Amino acid sequence: MSEQILAPLAACVHCGFCLPACPTYLATGDESDSPRGRILLMRALARGEIAATDDALNDHLDACLGCRGCEPVCPSGVRYGAGLEAARDVLARAHGLPLRARLILAVFRHRWIWQPVLTVSRWLRATGLPGALAGRGRVGFAMGMLDASQRSTVNGRLSTVDRRPGVRPSTCPSVRLFTGCVMSTLFPHVHRATERALARAGCQTTRPPGQACCGALHAHAGDLDGARALAAINVHAFGDSDDLIVVNSAGCGAMLKGYGHLLGGEDAARFSKRVKDVTELLDEGRETRDLRDRQSTCLTAVYDSPCHLQHAQGIIHQPLALLSEVPGLTLLPLADSDKCCGSAGIFSLLEPAMSQAVLDAKLDAILAVDPVPDLVLTGNPGCLMQIGAGLRARGSSIRTAHPVELLGARHD
Ligand code: SF4
Ligand code: SF4
């Protein structure tokens, strides 16, 4: 395991170019909360120079978002995320995960647990109670997250964007939708919008049965065995076909694309090569589609780039290119849109103080946009809920939505 930590980090020359890209370093100013400082700690762990039970080591690695914002700015090509995952696996084996993390990961390990739990959460959301209780404090923020997961209509304007189907069918192949856990239960409207957008692009979408949670929460927390078990279920569920696997959650997409590395073997590698984010796929056929029949909307929005879309998958321009074609949508620039929002899977539950510090910077940037946008668009459920809850806590009327809700808006 020490080699799995050292090898991805070996190229680090301690230049420090990554420091300004690190949200936790920007929040604390502490070198040990920077990529460079954490790399030194992880190397010391791998070489046996620091015990896996060392409090300071655990504190600084626990406080890392795993956002991988340090990777694209690194001139040496350090694979920070791979090193962090291996280090967290060592720490989890040495002293176990905190009880709260174990409980959350246990829920998402089994469909028969997470499906009813999240379905009941959706029912609670439908009562309007989370919206009424959303605000500051632990409970208010949790309620805000749940409220922010619902379809954002912005006075009904989201449903008036595109009344006609795509004019010219493209050569899009048949695709299989990765449904996931949170996306399938709290964001079914995003799945429906994804299918509509793909249908307009000429793609036939199916939902293979027997899928599991992608395992990203487990991998990022250091439970690699749990992540592998879920990955194996998904590789089996999608079968041995050439159909593309389309995903609309940035965190899940990055995880699915990493199954080849996580599981090893040809089946997993072939699976990972089939995976595409929905914006990646739609962008590929963009020039063949005729958008003239689209009805105009009247919305202003900013786009916030999810870490696991931009840093882990290298998908940066595609969502913006697609959104720029939505008639009547005014996209405003957002400062530091490439920075993490502090969600990072279960990070916001395990490290609430650091998560809030990182979120505050994001909210400050959003609330400084002039004129005030209607929407923050972002393609990851954790970011949608984290930013949405933060905006509610600040008393803002700005809402969050997935880009595909505009690209595949309803015909009503
Ligand atoms: S991770 Fe990359 S950018 Fe950061 S200190 Fe090391 S070599 Fe420099
Ligand atoms: S993964 Fe994110 S939080 Fe962690 S060191 Fe890199 S930039 Fe900083």
Image (spheres, rainbow, N blue to C red):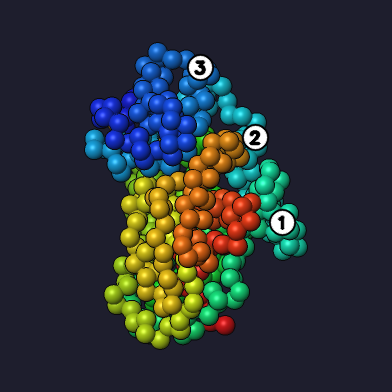
Disc tally is 3
Residue 100, numbered circle: 2
Q: How far apart are the alpha carbons under marks 3 and 2? A: 20 Å
Q: Which mark is residue 130?
A: 1
In the rendering, at what x and y percent does residue 20 appear? 35, 38
Looking at the image, tell me whether mark 3 or mark 2 is earlier in sequence order.
Answer: 3
Residue 395, x across and y down, in percent: 63, 56
Sooner in the amino-acid sequence: mark 1 or mark 2: 2
Under circle 1, the secondary element is helix
Task: Name the residue type under label 3.
Answer: Asp
Q: Identify the secondary structure beneath mark 2.
A: helix
Label 1 beta carbon within 8 A of ligand 2: no
Q: From this viewpoint, is residue 99 visible?
A: yes
**Answer yes or no: do the residues labelled 1 and 2 have beta carbons within 8 Å?**
no
The residue tagged 3 is 54
Mark 3 lies within 8 Å of ligand 2 (Cβ measured): no
The answer to which of marks 3 and 1 sits earlier in the sequence is: 3
Mark 2 crowdedness (10 Å alpha carbons): few <14, some 14-19, many ≥20: few
Image position of 126 (left or right of 404): right
Q: Secondary structure at mark 3?
A: loop
Query: What residue sits 49% from the left and 45% below the top?
Result: 361
| Foreground of the two, 324 or 76 | 324
